[in-house]
């Protein structure tokens, strides 16, 4: 695993020095910022220093490329070092991002700069939003199992580049109170009985999409960047589906929930974590890693669940031979979950 973050800032300070004026016409704005569960975030474009809310989409995409390259390179290089892997041995390099695009893509440019083979296969997972890390993990683990070669997944998101002009719409306040920038990478290698490094085995991936609620979460390309649409009904939809999704995942793999030590739940917001904890009847402290990532990093879209997994691994939350469940949610509305086993 590896991660890279731009410069950090304080949630209270960014409220007082920028967003208090930006959302002066929204009475609930300060309450939403202070009650978000976020204390610090990281951004390539801190609005206190640089207001990009009036930028056109083209300018934002140019800036994305400039900022994404060093962050992506640092995260993947850190994952290579953690795994003791030579870049030339990588068979597949997958990149997930919904916050910027370039052609040739950052996958091509990073593979070149990091010293991967010119025969490396590449996969770009675009515009899937916050849950993209889980299908990305499924795709690269399938490649590793089928081809017997290592693969790398990079999730790189820079939502700070999509600050929107002032508005009185509450969903925009919520989005700008939560989202932040990060890059996170994982290396996957073929299973080995002996000598495997500490980490997780990817056992299974499942998905559930409720198309009847497709308009509850949107990410639209506009002339002023990408605009988040976020309904307050999202937690209720997750409450409806999360227990069946997780129960089905565990049952088909012969795992009892009591065998799960780790819950890496995407912290889309405090209400989402509260709903998941309640619906799955999780014990106190089960979601500490998710709450901690929300507090320290905010919601970094697809990179967030990998940050949670890294925190769980660092803290030794999952004993060898025991299980972890990683979950993330996004447009669709879509729930993705992966069953992992610690080694």
Image (cartoon, rainbow, N blue to C red):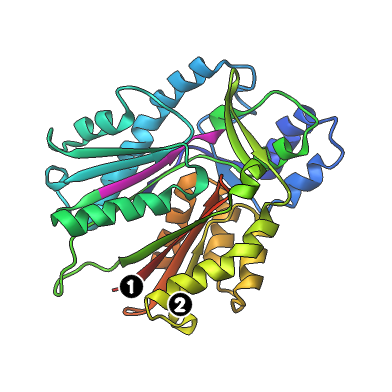
Depth check, front residue: 193 or 315: 193
Task: Please check the rendered image and state whether residue 173 is part of the magenta-colored stretch, yes or no.
Answer: no
- Please state the horizontal and vertical placement of residue 109, each as a whole percent of the image: 26, 28
Q: Quick check: 101 above or below 307? A: above
Depth check, front residue: 337 or 211: 211
Q: Residue at x 58, y 53 (%)?
A: 210
Verify CB contact (< 8 Å) between mark 2 and mark 1: yes
Depth check, front residue: 104 or 19: 104
- Please state the horizontal and vertical placement of residue 190, each as a whole percent of the image: 18, 61
Tell me where the magenta segment starts and ends, as one range. 152-159
Q: Quick check: 43 above or below 338? A: above
**Mark 1 lies on residue:** 342
Q: Name the quadrant containing residue 94.
A: top left
User: Is any atom of residue 318 visible in this view?
Assistant: no
Q: Residue at x 41, y 50 (%)?
A: 133
As helix, strand or loop, the secondary structure at mark 1 comes to strand
- Please state the horizontal and vertical placement of residue 241, each as a whole percent of the image: 60, 63
Which is more N-terminal, label 1 or label 2?
2
Q: Quick check: 159 above or below 200? A: above
Q: Residue at x 45, y 77 (%)?
A: 261
Are there few (<14), some (14-19), or many (20+) residues within 10 Å of tag 2?
some
- Please state the horizontal and vertical placement of residue 211, each as a whole percent of the image: 58, 48
The alpha-carbon separation of the residues under discs 2 and 1 comes to 10 Å
In terms of secondary structure, what is the magenta stretch mainly? strand
In the picture, measured across the screen, residue 1 lies left or right of residue 242, that is left
Mark on residue 261? 2
Quadrant of image for the N terminus: bottom left
As helix, strand or loop, the secondary structure at mark 2 comes to strand
Residue at the extreme front of the image, as rendered: 212
Mark on residue 8? none
Are there few (<14), some (14-19), or many (20+) residues within 10 Å of tag 1?
many
């Amino acid at each position: 695993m590896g991660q890279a973050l731009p410069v950090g800032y304080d949630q209270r300070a960014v409220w007082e020095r920028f967003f208090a004026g930006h959302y002066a016409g929204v009475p609930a704005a300060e309450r939403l910022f202070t009650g978000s569960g976020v204390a610090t975030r990281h951004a390539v474009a801190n609005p206190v220093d640089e207001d990009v809310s009036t930028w056109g989409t083209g300018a934002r995409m140019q800036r994305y490329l400039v900022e994404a390259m060093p962050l992506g390179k640092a995260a993947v290089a850190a994952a290579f070092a953690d795994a003791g892997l030579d870049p030339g041995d990588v068979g597949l390099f997958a990149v997930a991002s919904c916050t910027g695009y370039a052609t040739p893509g950052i996958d091509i440019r990073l593979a070149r700069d990091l010293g991967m083979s010119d025969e490396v296969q590449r996969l770009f997972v675009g515009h899937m939003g916050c849950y993209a890390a889980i299908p990305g993990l499924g795709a690269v683990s399938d490649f590793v199992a089928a081809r017997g070669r290592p693969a790398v997944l990079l999730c790189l998101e820079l939502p700070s580049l999509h600050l929107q002009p002032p508005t009185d719409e509450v969903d925009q306040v919520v989005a700008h109170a939560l989202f932040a920038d990060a890059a996170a990478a994982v290396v996957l290698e073929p299973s080995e009985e002996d000598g495997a490094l500490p980490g997780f085995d990817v056992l299974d991936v499942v998905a559930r999409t409720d198309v009847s609620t497709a308009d509850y979460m949107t990410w639209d390309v506009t002339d002023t960047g990408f605009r988040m649409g976020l309904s307050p009904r999202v937690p209720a939809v997750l409450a409806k589906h999360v227990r069946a999704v997780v129960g089905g995942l565990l049952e088909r793999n012969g795992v009892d929930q009591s065998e799960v030590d780790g819950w890496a739940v995407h912290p889309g917001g405090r209400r989402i974590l509260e709903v998941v904890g309640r619906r799955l009847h999780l014990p106190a402290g089960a979601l500490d890693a998710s709450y901690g990532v929300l507090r320290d990093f905010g919601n970094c879209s697809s990179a967030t669940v990998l940050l949670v997994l890294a925190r769980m691994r660092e803290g030794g939350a999952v004993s060898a031979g025991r299980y972890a469940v990683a979950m993330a949610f996004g447009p669709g509305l879509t729930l993705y979950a992966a069953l992992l086993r610690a080694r």
